Amino acid sequence: MNYLAPSILAADFCELGTQLDEVNRSGVQYLHIDVMDGMFVPSISFGMPVMACVRKRTKLFMDVHMMVEQPQRYVEEMIRLGADGITIHTEACDCVADTLAQIRRLGAKAGLAINPETPVSALLPYMDMVDMVLVMTVRPGFGGQKYITPCMDKIREIRGVIDAKYPDVKVQIDGGVLIENVKANLEAGANVIVCGSAVFHGDISENIKRFLEIMQE
Ligand code: DX5
Ligand code: ZN
């Protein structure tokens, strides 16, 4: 099963409610929420007050991507605000195992992300502790960037590991995904596809429909 996870980073924040209504009706199951702290990544996106509003407006799985230094500081609060899953970065956290365990203990799904320059081996010690891995396909921090092609080899690599030993772990990709390249990423082994600009720019329902057609083939 493949899942599309529209990223609200690319939404029009003045129209967020109505754009969420449109996503709610579109047949996707995930909503990707990019939290940035201006430290782990250069930019700052949004935080708790926005999450609380989004939670009230959707029943979709709220997939929170923490681009934040020492994300363990916020796990409890994020789950209280309605996060269904929290993904932390290996590069940003001094206590990855403890933080993943905390996320699960509090009832959410645990995800672990690697940046484009981080090897798949950084994920391997934690495979028993995660529900999802996230292979970043752009440098985190901004929407609308170009897909970094060599990352596709990392998708294949982690897919091999998962198929051999951890069949329930999902493989998410994030950044630069377009209608034109989604199929190749699915073939490489990704099954949770984050998509910002290519969903929210233009006709949201139509964009999602086109993605889902390809993803359900
Ligand atoms: C980038 C974020 C992404 C972003 C993707 O740092 O993690 O989730 O929204 O945006 P697009 O799909 O426009 O590359
Ligand atoms: Zn993201």
Image (cartoon, grey):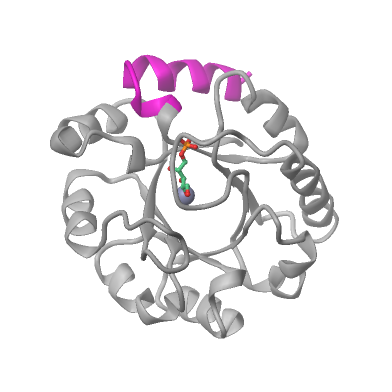
Using residue 200 as the reference point, say whether residue 175 is left or right of it: right
Using residue 80 as the reference point, say whether residue 183 is left or right of it: right
Name the image quarter holding residue 134. bottom right
Which quadrant, please, contains the C terminus? top right
Using residue 196 as the reference point, say whether residue 134 is left or right of it: right
Using the image as rendered, state which of residue 71 and residue 131 is in the foreground. 71
What count of labels does the image hold?
A: 0
Q: Up-down: is 112 above or below 143? A: below
Q: Up-down: is 126 above or below 182? A: below
Using the image as rendered, state which of residue 48 and residue 215 is in the foreground. 48
- What secondary structure prevails in the magenta region? helix
Residue at x 45%, y 25% (from the top left corner)? 198
Which quadrant, please, contains the N terminus? top right
Using the image as rendered, state which of residue 10 and residue 132 is in the foreground. 10
Q: Whole-percent x and y of residue 63?
A: 42, 53
Q: Which residues are magenta?
A: 198-217
Using residue 97 as the reference point, say whether residue 39 is left or right of it: left
Q: Is residue 95 magenta?
A: no
Residue at x 42%, y 69% (from the top left corner)? 39
Residue at x 63%, y 57% (from the top left corner)? 115
Q: Whole-percent x and y of residue 191?
A: 63, 40
